[in-house]
Amino acid sequence: MGTEIARECPGRYRRRMSPRLVPVLSLAALVLSLGARAATPPGDTFAAAGAAATATLIQVFYGGNGKWHECDSSDCPRVNQDWGVDSLTYALWLRWQTAHDSSIPPVMQQLAATAPTYPPPCTASCDSWSDVPEWDAIAALREYAVLGDPAVLAKAEAAFATVEGSNAYRLGGCPEIRYQQPYGQDNRLKTLETDGNAIKAAILLYRATGDRTYLADATQTYAAVRRWFFDRGAGLYSVYVFDDGSRCRQLPHRFFASVNGDMIWSGVALAAATGDAEYRREALATGRAVASSLADPAGVFADLQAENDVVEPLVEGMYSLATGLHASFARSWILTNAAAAVNARAPDGAFGRFFDGPPPTARTTAWQSNGGLGIEIAAAKLDPSGRTAASSVWTAAARFPTDAGPGTSITIHGSAVALLGTLGETCCEAGHARVFVDGRETFDRTGIWQDKSSLGQSIPDSILFAWRWPHPGRHTIRFEPGIPNGKEGGSFLHLTSFLVG
């Protein structure tokens, strides 16, 4: 009973092969290895982890002159637009809100100066994707919250208006939600990344200006999102709806952290703004569904396996439940995940995408790291003197080579597994696979979307999936071909190694 990989050959990988074994670590040797770990020193306090996260934001990801690096390397592109780096601005604002750190206003001033300036809404030839200005509007509003500069507020209003006032997106069979690309273009996709951010931006604009038109926009869009994106059986929001012009269909069980966090946050905010307790009830229900369904067996958030998702908005949503509604489960979610994520930091302080995973050794992108940075900042406010538990589960992990693809299974004995390969191997969008853990598909059916590299680069030795159990045991991870769709493309998976802890 060791660690093995068995191959079947469906679909594009169909060829005759016999099952084979990778180098096997015997169960006795593995148990000995796990039992012989050296004692680890006490963990950081949450206050220290929050301060370290802030330092990583400013010293590692911030590139100066109002631009963020898109990864934790100085040769990565420097930009100040769209969701990856915007999520770093959000994390910086969260630190300002929770700690009023004096290092933040000068950085926000520089970011505000380079924030995009949007033109009037397009009515004929349009080329902007609809979610980009909404992400940017929220970033500008977070900068405005720190600086109070009317010019920054004007940028946020213009970004919001460029989508709200355009006729290029509210089309198709369900025009109350918007296409991501003008007129639906390539794939007829409507993403909650547009409308979820639009609700949040509208609420923030209402708070900043007092203009009730923004509040009306928020409530109207919220109702449309509940109709088209909400999965009533799961209590969560799936991120994609395809609209072919006459029929709209939800892509099931794509529960991105960003959009569920937006909807939680907006529910809390709309309840406060309107006095309607139903928004509060819905926010609490979605928060509980996140905590119960989007976690590994060790109880840590681990079930969103798409590199283009960002987790910081979910941190904000759960923080709003913990502080605004005094929801104990949300406070526990933040502290539990913050304690785990500390062990997924690279030496430079950048966090891996998986809170329960090993520290990344490959370059780490803004899309991957924002969640860990945000969760430590939130925990530092909720329980500054609490201590994160240093863990050695990955320090003694055994590594095995593999060439696993769809139709393979990996059987391990341990309490943790991490799967590695080249992110964006056939760069940089289409190609995914389904993942079954001990016979059950992951609740979020994104599985592993390996070829989606938001950085636009192939990144070898990336952590593509991580999972932990409370106790060591025998577990099987099976990979099935991805079901083709207009966003994730067809089937692809090529693992190069895996870690067993």
Image (cartoon, grey):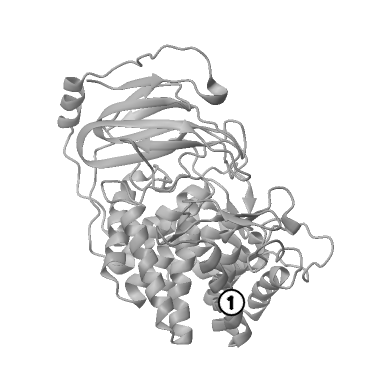
Q: Position of residue 282 (x, y in %)?
A: 41, 72
Residue 267 image offset from top left, x and y in percent: 45, 74
Quarter of the view holding residue 424: top right
The residue that appears at 58% across and 38% down in the rendered structure is 484
Q: Which amino acid does label 1 sit on?
A: Gln
The spot of residue 326 in percent (x, y) is 30, 75
Is residue 473 something that shows in the picture? yes
Query: In front here: 10 or 136?
Result: 10
Q: Which residue lies furthest to the right in this view?
A: 124
Q: Position of residue 317 (x, y in %)?
A: 42, 67
In which quadrant is the N terminus drawn?
top left
Q: Mark 1 falls on what kind of element? A: helix
Image mark count: 1
**Which residue is nearer to you in this view: 472 or 276?**
276
Q: To which quarter of the image does residue 184 belong?
A: bottom right
**Along the viewing direction, whichever of 182 and 382 lies nearer the viewer:** 182
Left or right of residue 300, residue 387 in this image: left
Name the residue: 43% across, 46% down: 353
Residue 98 shows in the view: no
Residues 408 and 306: in front is 408
Instruction: Specify the farthest residue to the front.
Output: 246
Task: Please give left or right for residue 199 compared with residue 275 in the image.
Answer: right
Q: Is residue 211 above or below residue 405?
A: below
The quadrant of the rendering that contains the C terminus is top left
In the figure, is residue 400 to the left or right of 115? left
> Is residue 497 shown above or below 350?
above
Q: Which residue is drawn at 46% across and 78% down?
A: 269
Structural crowding at the residue carrying mark 1, measured as other residues with C-alpha within 10 Å and reported as few (<14), some (14–19) or many (≥20): few
Q: Label 1, on which residue? A: 220
Q: Which residue is drawn at 43% across and 35% down?
A: 361
